[in-house]
Image (tube, grey):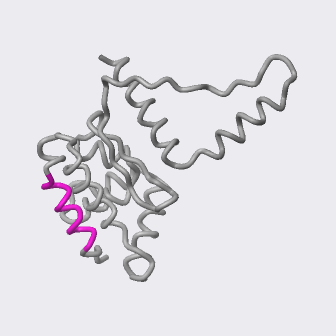
Amino acid sequence: MSIPRQLIKSFEIIRDCKLVVSKDPTEENLKEFGKAMNNSIPDQSNQISFMIYKFMRGMYLNDKKRFLNYILGMPHYESMILWTDYNDILQFFELSGVIFLGWNKSVNKYQAAKLDLSKKKSLDVLEEPKTNPRNKFDDKVLEFEKQDDYDVLHQRIATIQQQLQAQT
């Protein structure tokens, strides 16, 4: 199978980018990384590349471990790591604990952010009240569902930061 050139090019850019090489999550380095990540995913206008992407993504989602074992260590095929999930991507480039990587559904793009261990954000946990004011709980659920993807991403960042702080 032929791998789309844009995937290989994006992989090479990411592998050699300042963020991956230096592990320094400056704004400029995050932009370079994020741009290459987003360029790795073909759009629907390139039907052949998009079909290959969807097929390989389906294989990955079906059996992640087997897919990773298949692609890693094979020239050019390892570039398909960019078509996996953020955890596998960060682990491959040794960026776990350095940056946060997430998918923003509203714009269909990756977003990368620096993890800042000096900031600790508390998260509210939704609990059903013991008494029967069901409306208050329903209102909280509706409020939570209205949050946009950025709020969800920031909550994931806060959770990761808390986990890292607990480890140190």
Q: Main secondary structure of the magenta part?
A: helix
Question: Was residue 148 drawn as part of the magenta stretch in this picture?
Answer: no
Instruction: Please provide percent x and percent y for residue 85.
Output: 40, 51
In-image side of 20 versus 52 (left or right)? left
Up-down relation of residue 57 to residue 116 (above or below): below
Instruction: Please provide percent x and percent y for residue 121.
Output: 45, 25
Closer-to-camera residue (37/155)? 155
Instruction: Please provide percent x and percent y for residue 88.
Output: 35, 46
x 36%, y 25%: residue: 119
Instruction: Please provide percent x and percent y for residue 153.
Output: 46, 43
x 30%, y 44%: residue: 90
Up-down relation of residue 123 to residue 55 (above or below): above
- Marks counted in the figure total 0
Up-down relation of residue 118 to residue 70 (above or below): above
Q: On the rendered image, what quadrant is the C terminus found in? A: top left
- The part of the image, by quadrant, that contains residue 76 is bottom left
- The part of the image, by quadrant, that contains residue 81 is bottom left
Q: On the rendered image, what quadrant is the N terminus found in? A: bottom left
x 24%, y 54%: residue: 33
Up-down relation of residue 154 to residue 30 (above or below): above
What segment carries the magenta color? 6-17
Closer-to-camera residue (32/70)? 32
